[in-house]
Image (spheres, helix red, strand yellow):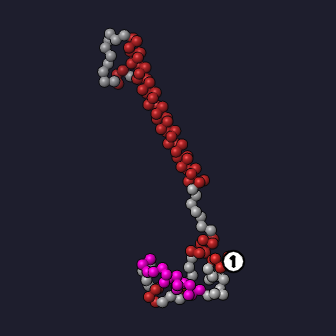
């Protein structure tokens, strides 16, 4: 270890000073190893806690079949539109016009075409 340092101790150095020097170097290595151990332990603990949070506490919302039914559209709604609305650029038109067209195309007696809140009641 003495050869790895910048300077060597002189030949006439007392043994007690040599032992203090060696103990100082050894304690520096011990502190370095414990800091590496604590860093690895903290990293593994943080990763385990992140996995626990993502899997147990903050799950992604999985849509129910009712949510999927509300989000889907039917071909009749597209076929009942005017020609200009069929070739419009998506998300640039008014949403009120589109919703009025869908509502006007719904058949009141058809249970599949009723809004979901009426179908539940």
Where is residue 105? Give x, y as percent: 56, 87
Q: Which residues are magenta?
A: 91-106
Which residue does the image show at 53% across and 89% down from the upper left? 80
Where is residue 17? Give x, y as percent: 38, 14
Quadrant occupied by the N terminus: top left
Q: Nearer the viewer, residue 30 or 1?
A: 30
Q: Secondary structure at mark 1?
A: loop
Mark 1 lies on residue: 121
Q: Is residue 109 left or right of residue 71?
A: right
Whether residue 98 is situated above or below residue 60 in the rendered picture: below
92 within the magenta span: yes
Q: Nearer the viewer, residue 95 or 47?
A: 95
Overall secondary structure of the magenta section: helix
Q: Let me know if residue 76 appears in the view.
A: no
Which residue does the image show at 43% across and 83% down from the upper left? 88
Q: Is residue 8 left or right of residue 72?
A: left
Q: Residue furthest toward the right?
A: 121
Which residue does the image show at 48% across and 89% down from the upper left? 82
Among the 4 quarters of the image, the one containing residue 21: top left
Whether residue 5 is situated above or below residue 91 in the rendered picture: above
Which residue does the image show at 65% across and 79% down from the upper left? 118
Q: Let me know if residue 53 appears in the view.
A: yes
What is the crowding at mark 1: few (fewer than 14 residues within 10 Å), some, or many (at least 20)? few
């Amino acid at each position: 270890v003495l050869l790895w340092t910048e300077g060597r101790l002189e030949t006439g150095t007392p043994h007690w000073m040599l032992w203090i020097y060696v103990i100082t170097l050894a304690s520096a290595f011990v502190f370095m190893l414990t800091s590496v151990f604590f860093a690895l332990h903290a990293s593994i603990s943080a990763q385990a806690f992140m996995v626990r949070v993502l899997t147990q506490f903050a799950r992604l919302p999985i849509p129910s079949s009712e949510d999927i039914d509300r989000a889907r559209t039917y071909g009749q709604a597209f076929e009942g539109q005017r020609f200009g609305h069929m070739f419009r650029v998506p998300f640039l038109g008014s949403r009120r016009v589109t919703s009025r067209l869908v509502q006007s195309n719904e058949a009141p007696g058809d249970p599949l075409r009723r809004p979901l809140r009426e179908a539940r009641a």
